Image (tube, helix red, strand yellow):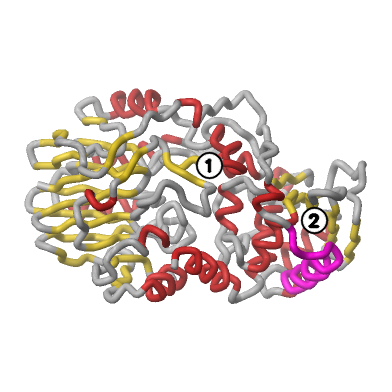
Amino acid sequence: MIEVRLIGHATVQLCFGEEVLLCDPHLGASYGGGLFTYFPTRVLNVEELPRPTAIYISHRHRDHFDLASLARLNRTLPVYCPLDIEVLTALRSLGFETICPVKDWLETEFGGATLLFTPSLYRVPEHGVLVRYQDSVIWNMVDTVVDGTTLAHVQEWLQGRSLGLLLWPYQPLKETDAVEGRSLDLFPRNLSADLDVLRTLKPRSVVPYSDGQVGEGPTAWLNHYRFPVASSEIELAVKRLLPATDLWLPQPGLTLRVEESGTSRMNDCPGVVAGDSPHDLRSFDATEPAPGPADVGLHDLFPARSTLPRLFDVLESRIRRVAKAQGWTGAWWTAAHFGIAYDIVIEREEAPDAMLRWRPTDEFIRYECCPDSLPSRGRFVVRIPQGVLERLITGRMHYVTAYLGGLFRTWDSAFELTRVGLIDVPRISIMSELTDCLPSRGVLTPALFLNALISVEPDLWKHALQNDLNEVR
């Protein structure tokens, strides 16, 4: 028997024998400096939670890897984590004594259970975990992106056993499309690809989960676009595909007993009380345009410290380094050939918006006052408050925090000529990382361009991490 306790969002306790494996611990009321919280709401009494005997970190994104929560845990607990320099550095800095980096398909024994760490196609080191204990098997997929090869490997590992419970990620990421000014059609990523997991493995029980983050304050405007697939739609899709499968909607405190004979509900997890969550926190309507961030005192939260000329100097220096970086020659040639300009619009509190324009022909134009009218075509635009920009390029804010919080907006009014093969503009919606923003082809989208200005500074991730560590010590 395996006991599964849902704490909220991706935080789960997997209990077997005498062991309690705590997955992606988030134990506070909010995270990201108060920019994000949880849905459905919950109240935690950490002292009453069952004590973990080990910790599992799926990947580095801060809605899964919360330093403040880790700082509250016993440093003698073993920690299973990806082979990721950022995660490993943070865990060592926090003083964890037994760090167990895992690789794709690593199989290990723990407390009488077998753990198998499953890979992801996503660009950062990331894993799900299969747990087999006695005759029970569950798979915590977390956020992993899988394909038919992965599913075939899982089937082979099961050796004919049924999958008792699947913790299943299913939601398309629409908030990233809103940030980048893209189409808000409901299914940019075909939901059938997610249903393939169910179709192939036919789990006896499913929990659609890892969809519990919402924004607060300046990030709340994106809640309209977060996790747009309603639970009723998922319930209908699962029942149509697998009528005999039990569907358990995630609620903080829900505890499930997974046995060979089936899955049943137990008493709620001690220390977890589900709150009264208003449904309008997430009210996706594909017919409405992106409203953009409201006036919520961004400049008060992130005050600017640099003078505009100094900021222009830093940006120009970074752009020149990005332009010379190995591997990006084709991207710049394409942008230059079609006359594309990169515009960084800098929002200021008590002065007109400024703008730095760069063309890959190495032409810079500084505008202390952003022009009222600019060409409507051939532009890649990043619009960002000055204080947020300063924090990003100095490592005082993580790029993903700003990106998933909607603290900047981008759009492009270039052109796509893919039908005649002249230019291929990547139209992806991916949370780019500090250390990986190289497009495979075409030109750099505005969001990737901003990320490039950060990642070109090789040790900037260390500054961002150290800033996070300083806040929890």
Residue ID at (54%, 48%): 35
Residue 166 in view here: yes
Q: Type of residue at label 2? A: Tyr
Q: Which mark is residue 215?
A: 1
User: Splitting the image into 4 quarters, where does residue 211 fall?
Assistant: top left
Secondary structure, mark 1, is strand
The question of residue 361 being in magenta is answered with: no
- Which secondary structure class fits the magenta region best? helix
Residue holding disc 2: 342
User: Splitting the image into 4 quarters, where does residue 150 fall?
Assistant: bottom left
Whole-number angstrom distance, CA of label 1 to CA of label 2: 29 Å
Nearer to us in this view, 328 or 156: 328
Residue ID at (27%, 61%): 55
Give percent across and percent down for residue 17.
9, 55
Residue ID at (79%, 55%): 344
Secondary structure, mark 2, is strand
Instruction: Specify the segment rendered in magenta.
Output: 304-322
